[in-house]
Image: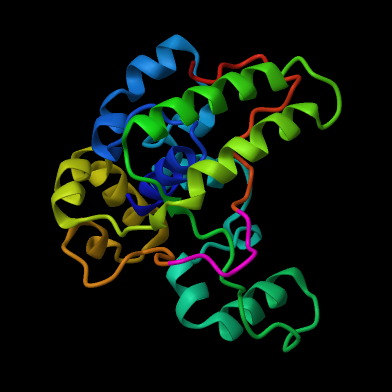
């Protein structure tokens, strides 16, 4: 659920998500998929980890797969990074922290956001047909204006979580069977967010992985 919320917040702050509420945006997913929206707008489907791991284990032996919680990277960065390095057979002890990067802003809804978002989506569509970095050059100033007055990223509320749980409850059960680990806390109230919230470090830009490549024929919402 935090993954879906983070994904939605990312696109909302970039002007590429037209619905200003993550719960309503998730409710639109089937219609969006049928209409051909790109995968980055599939907030629910991308967060069904049980299905994804169950499929992955039909293709690769489990000993070739390392799965860990994102909160381990936040709470115990050095130990988790060493675990990753050990899995890949590279030297441990060189990495001690994960920089606080790509923390998304949360612009408020309003006329300003509507107008800038429409311009951002038009720029993204135009960028599919422009050479080189012209598409990025069109989008970046608009994205900067959107995020300039944005509040810090907000955590997912318990009310929102309750409305999203039905999309994920069966998959959480599958994830527990596949991994043998307990993920029941994902379905209960939490005293903290699963991801990074708050302000972004000075000078840190938001990652641009919501941008559809020029050669990608899938749709950006208009």
Main secondary-structure element of the magenta-colored stretch: loop
Residue 67 percent across, percent down from the top left: 53, 62
Range of residues picked out in magenta: 199-205
Q: Which residue is drawn at 43% across and 71% down?
A: 71
- Viewer-nearest residue: 20 or 220: 20
- Viewer-nearest residue: 28 or 87: 28
Tell me if 211 is positioned left or right of 214 in this view: left
Residue 35 percent across, percent down from the top left: 44, 10
Q: In this view, does 56 lie above or below 199?
A: above
Q: In which quarter of the image is residue 91?
A: bottom right
Count of numbered circles in the view? 0
Residue 218 percent across, percent down from the top left: 60, 16
Q: Which residue occupies the extreme right position in the image?
A: 132
Q: Is residue 183 above or below residue 7?
A: below
Q: In which quarter of the image is residue 123?
A: top right
Q: Which residue occupies the extreme bottom position in the image?
A: 93
Q: Which residue is drawn at 26% across and 27% down?
A: 27
Q: Is residue 201 magenta?
A: yes
Q: Quadrant of residue 181?
A: bottom left
Q: Which residue is drawn at 62% across and 50% down?
A: 207
Tell me if 75 is positioned left or right of 209 in this view: left
Residue 162 percent across, percent down from the top left: 14, 48
Tell me if 38 is positioned left or right of 127 in this view: left
Q: In this view, does 73 lie above or below 66?
A: below
Tell me if 15 is positioned left or right of 138 in this view: left
């Amino acid at each position: 659920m935090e993954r879906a919320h983070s994904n939605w917040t990312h696109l909302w702050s970039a002007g590429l998500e037209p619905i200003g509420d993550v719960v309503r945006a998730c409710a639109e997913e089937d219609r969006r998929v049928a209409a051909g929206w790109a995968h980055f707008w599939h907030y629910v489907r991308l967060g069904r980890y049980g299905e994804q791991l169950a499929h992955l284990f039909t293709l690769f032996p489990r000993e070739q797969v390392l799965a860990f919680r994102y909160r381990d990277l936040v709470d115990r960065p050095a130990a988790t990074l060493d675990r990753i390095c050990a899995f890949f057979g590279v030297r441990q002890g060189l990495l001690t922290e994960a920089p606080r990067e790509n923390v998304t802003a949360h612009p408020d809804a309003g006329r300003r956001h509507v107008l800038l978002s429409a311009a951002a989506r038009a720029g993204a569509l135009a960028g599919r047909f422009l050479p080189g970095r012209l598409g990025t050059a069109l989008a970046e100033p608009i994205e900067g204006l959107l995020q300039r007055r944005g509040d810090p990223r907000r955590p997912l509320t318990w009310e929102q979580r309750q409305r999203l749980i039905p999309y994920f409850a069966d998959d959480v059960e599958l994830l527990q069977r596949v991994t043998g680990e307990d993920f029941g806390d994902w379905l209960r109230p939490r005293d903290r967010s699963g991801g990074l919230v708050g302000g972004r470090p000075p000078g840190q830009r938001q990652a641009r992985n919501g941008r559809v490549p020029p050669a990608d024929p899938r749709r950006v919402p208009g």
